Image: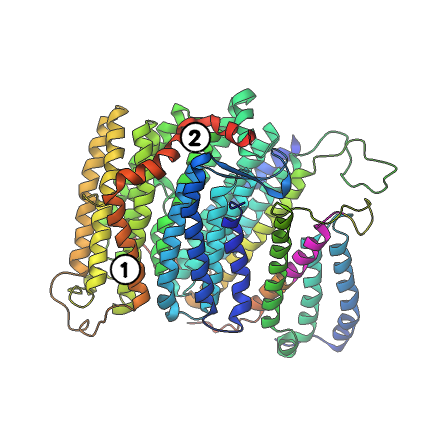
Amino acid sequence: MQGMSVIVKTIARMMVGFVFMYGIYIILHGHLTPGGGFAGGCIVAGAFVLLYLAYGRDEAKEKLQSSLTSIFESIGAFLFWLIALTGIIWGYFFFNFIERGTPLSILSGGIIPLANIAIGIKVASALFGIFIALASVKFVLRE
Amino acid sequence: MAVYSACILLIGIGLYCIVVKRNLVKIIIGFAILEYAVNLFFASVGYRASALAPIVVDEARPVPSCVDPLPQALVLTAIVIGLGVTALMIAIAYRLYEKYGTFDVSEIRRLRG
Amino acid sequence: MIVPLFVAIPLGLSFLIPLFSKVSRRSGDLLTNLGTAALLVLSLYSIRLLSGGPLVYHMGGWKPPFGIVLVLDSLSLLVLVCVSVVSFACSLYSISYMDQFTSKWKFYTLFMLMITGLNGVTVTGDVFNMYVFFEIAAIASYALVAFGTEHEELEAAFKYMVVGSVASMAILLSIALLYGGLGTLNLADLSRKIAGAGDPRLLAFAGALFLTGFAVKAALVPFHSWLPDAHPSAPAPISAMLSGVFIKVLGVYAISRIFFNVFGVKPVYLNLLLFFGFASLVIAAFLALKQSDMKRLLAYSTISQIGYIALGLGTGTPLGIMGALFHILSHSTGKALLFLTSGSLVYSAQTRNLQEMGGLEERMPVTATSFTVGALSIAGVPPFHGFFSKLFIIIGLWQAQRYALAVVGILISVLTLAYMLKAEKHAFFGRIREELRGVKESPATMLVALVFLAALCIGIGLFFPWIVKVLIEPARDVLLKGIAYADTVFQS
């Protein structure tokens, strides 16, 4: 699969930073505005997909590897599990062990922002991994 | 009432596609329609007449009455589950095309009896 | 404190296995077997803990009905013991068996996720949480059925996926209707609200949708069409898990929990269970006679035995329900043993077709003996445990004045013996063929798993009064108590 023209590659390079930042904004403000881990993770995956589509499979294969996505996926899921497990020290699984904080500020809501970050990492890498797996199949049609 | 009838109609369309169509991709699309219709039904169960969205912007002005936020959280989970199933179906359909050479369900029939 | 560990241990391991497999290749085997051994020890230890009443755990410290509760009572404990025993045997077996496939760590990840889902469905007390764990187990099983990525496995997996997903959508629609009509998701709270002021039309529709969804997963007869393709195509330890525990947890346990404890026992549900059970029993037994593929024969036999369990639940009498619960335990160990031996035949002789096998008894003595133990126990021959469970079901049917069904149960039991002996004769007895002379016995870990399950088949049969008193009778009391389940959840 080849990439697209030079114009597309240049604009994609410029836009990826903004898309990535927007996705991180949605993840971090999940307890204040609609969105959260899953929606923000989809947007971050969209940033990577934009790069992959603009540069084509042959060039992007070395830079955006599927083994890295697998590692990040497991790390994100494992972080979520650790957050749930540390609640047990205070008595209950999934217990809210951070202070509530003042409402409507960024540092509030207990463990929810941390859980959003973990879910965001996992969803972004999982969706990008699915995209790589489906896009890198080389079809040899059996007659 | 209109929303519920639209959901039931969409469920019917989704089931029709799964049962009648012979192309694998159309079956997957039918399943996607069915799943979105059930999620739409679940989310619209929480509606209350003349109520606002459950987002608190400023602590000085609380929301007087808002729609039920619990079905919205549950539907978020259900959408993610549906995404997982759809992705797996598409991957299996890809491999089926590689092995059998066709998307037609009536030709993919090695297992019988 | 111990209740969330049943979900936390397999979930954490399934996230750790991909990370550790980048480092060493054998780490997947070690982690999986440690996990299933830990779950087995935990479930056996919980038998002692439950003598003081059911354990209720509030997730995150939120009280019901606002938060999710995890409830471990005797019925959940019986199902957990079945799941732990069969999954321990299958994980021992997969150390050598899965060397035929590539990327073994993916298999272990999906296996652990499936165990998470099964344990989660069993211990949860919240209906949407049950749906989420249901889907985790189901998606893991769809991927595992397609693991070998050959022609037939992909076709079977796609068929299974479409049918299973439509069933899950029916369950989700029913949950949406119940929430819209009654306003709660907690199982105990739902049972109180249904008994109080439920609209009968809403309850009938929701009950019908639930029964459809769970009957598809339990493979009762009008809804069984995915099973004879999916179970033979999966790798052998996954066939054992699917036939042994997956159908029972997601189908039979869910039906009994929802229809006995939440909706309350009504004669219409019992009659429906009797009808589906009778149809499964008879139709699947006749279809199993004409199969020449060994795993397909065992798959039809599974459908037939689930018919027995549905008949036992549908009687409504204490002895019938006790027989059904005992048959869950005996069928899971017996059928898992049979599927694992068929996997040994695939591993050594490279074939599943009964017409191509013959006389393998002299080459594979341990496998042949364990197949005999499993076949006689499923067919219901004393002193194996299958005899006692079927006896209880048939006596329960007689006590509920369903004389015709009891006679049919006895006749189908004879038919079960017939096709099991046919499979054994074609595979193991007779003279060995020329091309099978080089066949060797299976590796040691596979044999250990087979001997473990065979010893359980004999042991549970010999010590059945003790097993019935400790495991089965408390579980039966939970089901007979019906709606009083809500009191145990709310009072702690």
What is the tally of numbered marks visible in this picture? 2
Left or right placement of residue C388 versus residue C231 in this view? left
Q: Is residue C15 above or below residue C184?
A: below
Identified at 34% across, 60% down, the residue is C236
Task: Tell which of A75 and C420 is nearer to you.
Answer: A75
Q: Residues within 10 Å of mark 2 (few under 14, many from 20)?
A: many
Above-or-below relation of A66 to C116:
below
Find out whether residue A96 is within the magenta segment: no
How far, Cα to Cα, is label 1 from label 2?
A: 36 Å
The residue at which mark 1 appears reads as C342
Element carrying mark 2: helix
Q: Chain of mark 1?
A: C
The magenta stretch spans which residues?
A109-124
- Residue C230 in percent (x, y) is at 38, 54
In the figure, A109 relative to B65: above or below? below
Q: Report the amino acid beneath label 2.
A: Phe
> Are callouts 1 and 2 both on one chain?
yes
Kind of residue indicated by mark 1:
Ser
Residue at x-position 62% and y-position 76% = A61
Question: Residue A96, percent across and down?
Answer: 69, 46
| C445 and C18: which is toward the camera | C445
Q: Earlier in the sequence, mark 1 or mark 2?
A: 2
Q: Secondary structure at mark 1?
A: helix
Task: Indicate left or right for B68 with C215 as reference.
Answer: right
Image side of residue A14 versus residue C421, left or right:
right
Split into 4 quadrants, where in the image is the N terminus of chain B? top right
Residue at 20% x, 51% y is C420
Q: Residues within 10 Å of mark 1 (few under 14, many from 20)?
A: many
Q: Quadrant of residue C491?
A: top right
Q: Is residue B28 left or right of residue C474?
A: right
Q: Which residue is mark 2?
A: C260
